């Protein structure tokens, strides 16, 4: 029995349905193109930890970059004639606020000092109908 | 492969959490050309000299301030020059900040904000005083 006889015998006993051969070829091609094992099947706990740490680092860097920078120091004048400047001194490693236009400080009493209160006797001797 | 990632993650986390605590020190020094009275520590004196140029810095007064206390803190140098400090509200993971107001002759003359950073103090140039100059210092404790 040669090949042609065998093929004819098979066609008689097991006839090929229409499209069956094409479907078989397609299934075979699909299996050949897929990897032998799934991607997730190869993951181990070490790789999951490593990927997780990488994602966390990237997320934190992204958050830090997205957060608006806070000025370490600021100064603004609240009085005419006073000039306020804030800067960082590299040689001193310090933030500096520089104020110009102030009068010298003194040891003398100010109007906030208790010794500069109005004499209460003057208010006691005030006439009742005075404002 | 895992160890470098974990080390990097730990570094980033540590960097994010390594900010100053809520305790600060605030005080006054007088920059002078001749030494008189107790002097500033050598390291601080050197830093002050880099900014203000005086050779000597006499300690005037100072105190520790806990920024967690929800109230104003007044630090008076002279009756006519003082500073008000108030802690700024902030999220728990953010660095501590404060608001300061500078008063001269009873009136506010300047205000601003300062983010408390370890090893980076704040120097405020005050008015002339006697033969020197008043300097206000805030640093992290």
Image: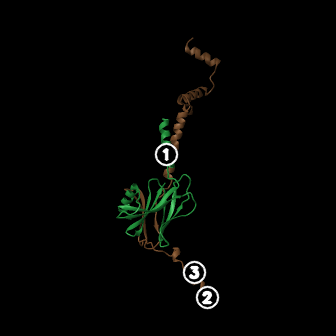
Q: Residue placed at 57% from the left, 62% from the top?
A: B71
Residue under circle 3?
A120
In front here: A60 or A10? A60
Label 1 neighbour load within 10 Å: few <14, some 14-19, many 20+? some
**Residue B67 picture quarter:** bottom right
x%, y% of residue B103?
48, 69
The chain drawn in brown is A
In front here: B42 or A66? B42
x%, y% of residue A95?
43, 59
x%, y% of residue B24?
50, 57
x%, y% of residue A54?
50, 41
Instruction: Using the image, name the chain to which the residue with label 2 belongs.
Output: A
Chain B pictured colour: green
Q: Marks 1 and 2, Cα distance to the nearest angstrom?
A: 75 Å
Instruction: Using the image, name the chain to which the residue with label 1 belongs.
Output: B
**Which element carries disc 3, helix, strand or loop?**
helix
Are marks 1 and 2 in one subunit?
A: no
Label 3 neighbour load within 10 Å: few <14, some 14-19, many 20+? few
* Res B12 visible: yes
Q: Marks 3 and 2, Cα distance to the nearest angstrom?
A: 14 Å
Relative vertical location of residue A52 with respect to residue A17 in this rendering, above or below: below
Relative vertical location of residue A61 with respect to residue B84 in this rendering, above or below: above
1 or 3: mark nearer the eye: 3
1 or 2: mark nearer the eye: 2
Q: Residue placed at 50% from the left, 42% from the top?
A: B10
Q: Marks 1 and 3, Cα distance to the nearest angstrom?
A: 65 Å
In front here: B126 or B87? B126
Are marks 1 and 3 in one subunit?
A: no
Asked whether the residues under the numbered discs 1 and 3 touch, taking CB atoms below 8 Å apart as contact, a structural biologist would say no
Residue under circle 1?
B12
Of mark 3 and mark 2, the one earlier in the sequence is 3
Residue under circle 2?
A127
């Amino acid at each position: 029995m040669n090949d042609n006889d065998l093929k004819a015998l098979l066609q008689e006993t097991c006839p090929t349905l229409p499209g069956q051969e094409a479907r078989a070829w397609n299934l075979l091609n699909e299996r050949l193109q897929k990897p032998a094992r799934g991607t997730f099947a190869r993951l181990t706990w070490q790789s999951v930890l490593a990927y997780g740490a990488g994602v966390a680092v990237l997320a934190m860097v992204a958050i830090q970059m997205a957060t608006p920078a806070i000025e370490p120091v600021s100064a603004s004048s609240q009085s005419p004639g006073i000039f306020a400047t804030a800067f960082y001194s590299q040689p001193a490693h310090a933030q500096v606020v520089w104020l110009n236009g102030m009068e010298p400080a003194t040891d003398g009493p100010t109007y906030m000092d208790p010794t500069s209160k109005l004499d209460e006797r003057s208010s006691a001797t005030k006439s009742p109908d005075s404002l | 492969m895992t160890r470098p990632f974990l080390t990097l993650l730990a570094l980033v986390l540590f960097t994010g959490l390594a900010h100053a605590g809520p305790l600060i020190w605030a005080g006054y020094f007088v920059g002078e050309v001749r030494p008189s009275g107790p002097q500033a520590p050598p390291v601080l004196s050197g830093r002050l000299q880099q900014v203000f140029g005086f050779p000597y810095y006499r300690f005037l007064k100072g105190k520790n301030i806990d920024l967690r206390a929800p109230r104003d803190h007044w630090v008076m140098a002279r009756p006519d020059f003082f500073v008000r400090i108030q802690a700024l509200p902030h999220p728990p993971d953010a660095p501590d900040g404060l608001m300061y107001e500078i008063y001269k002759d009873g009136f506010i003359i300047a205000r601003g904000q300062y983010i408390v950073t370890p090893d980076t103090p704040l120097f405020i140039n005050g008015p002339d005083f006697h033969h020197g100059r008043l300097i206000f210092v805030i640093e992290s404790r």
